[in-house]
């Protein structure tokens, strides 16, 4: 089975779209109203990236979402979103084996959670970085080797 990001032109589309979002400020609960260069949260940023490149329906509205001190129901919102798209599937879940850095592909979505307090969604790119929207930094990149990613990663999704 060929995945969406196996094609170089799709990787280029992703990289171009991610750069449009670089430096976008973080704002809680932006949901479907996130805009590159304006504001986003850690759920609306990746979902809108994939909406803008055509992987998620254009009329999709991300739910309002609180990433910190939010309870497990907010983590479930992330899972519900990703599970609802017919073109995503789970490639790894915590407990299957160690976090699969060597198996990650461009465009993989990494869900991280500390349990009930903090939840986060990141996009992997093949230079061993993730793109994400973080409260103090806005949309930025972080090296995949950060201990927090290994420690709190819960699931990895991929686009078909």
Image: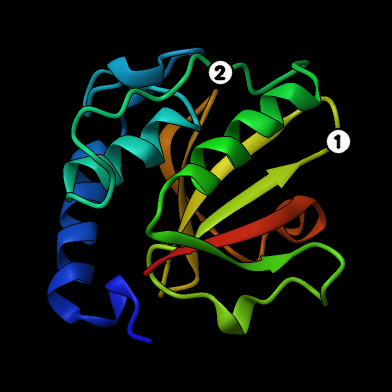
Q: Position of residue 152 (x, y in %)?
A: 78, 50
What residue is rendered at 48% in x and 57% in y? 130
Circle 2 crowding by C-alpha within 10 Å: few under 14, some 14–19, many from 20: many
User: On the image, numbered disc 1 is attached to which residue?
Assistant: 115
Q: Position of residue 116 (x, y in %)?
A: 85, 27
What residue is rendered at 38% in x and 34% in y? 45
Mark 2–mark 1 CB contact (< 8 Å): no
What residue is rendered at 38% in x and 63% in y? 107
Q: Position of residue 144 (x, y in %)?
A: 59, 64
Q: Position of residue 112 (x, y in %)?
A: 69, 46
Relative side of 57 to 79, left or right = left
Circle 1 crowding by C-alpha within 10 Å: few under 14, some 14–19, many from 20: some
Quadrant of the image occupied by residue 97: bottom right
User: On the image, numbered disc 2 is attached to which residue?
Assistant: 65
Q: If you read the primary sequence from the N terminus, does the residue marked by circle 2 or circle 1 appear first?
A: 2
Relative side of 153 to 91, left or right = right
């Amino acid at each position: 089975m060929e995945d969406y990001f196996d094609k170089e032109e799709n990787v280029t589309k992703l990289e171009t779209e991610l750069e449009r979002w670089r430096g976008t400020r973080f704002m809680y609960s932006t949901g479907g109203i996130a805009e590159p260069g304006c504001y986003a949260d850690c759920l609306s940023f990746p979902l809108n990236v994939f909406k803008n490149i055509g992987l998620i329906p254009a009329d999709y509205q991300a739910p309002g979402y609180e990433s910190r001190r939010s309870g497990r129901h907010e983590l479930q919102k992330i899972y519900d979103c990703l599970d609802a798209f017919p073109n995503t599937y789970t490639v790894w879940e915590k407990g299957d084996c160690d976090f699969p850095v060597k198996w990650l592909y461009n465009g993989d979505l990494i869900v991280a959670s500390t349990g009930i307090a903090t939840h986060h969604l990141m996009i992997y790119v093949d230079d061993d970085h993730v793109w994400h929207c973080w409260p103090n930094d806005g949309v930025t990149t972080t090296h995949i080797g950060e201990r927090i990613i290994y420690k709190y990663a819960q699931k990895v999704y991929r686009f078909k």
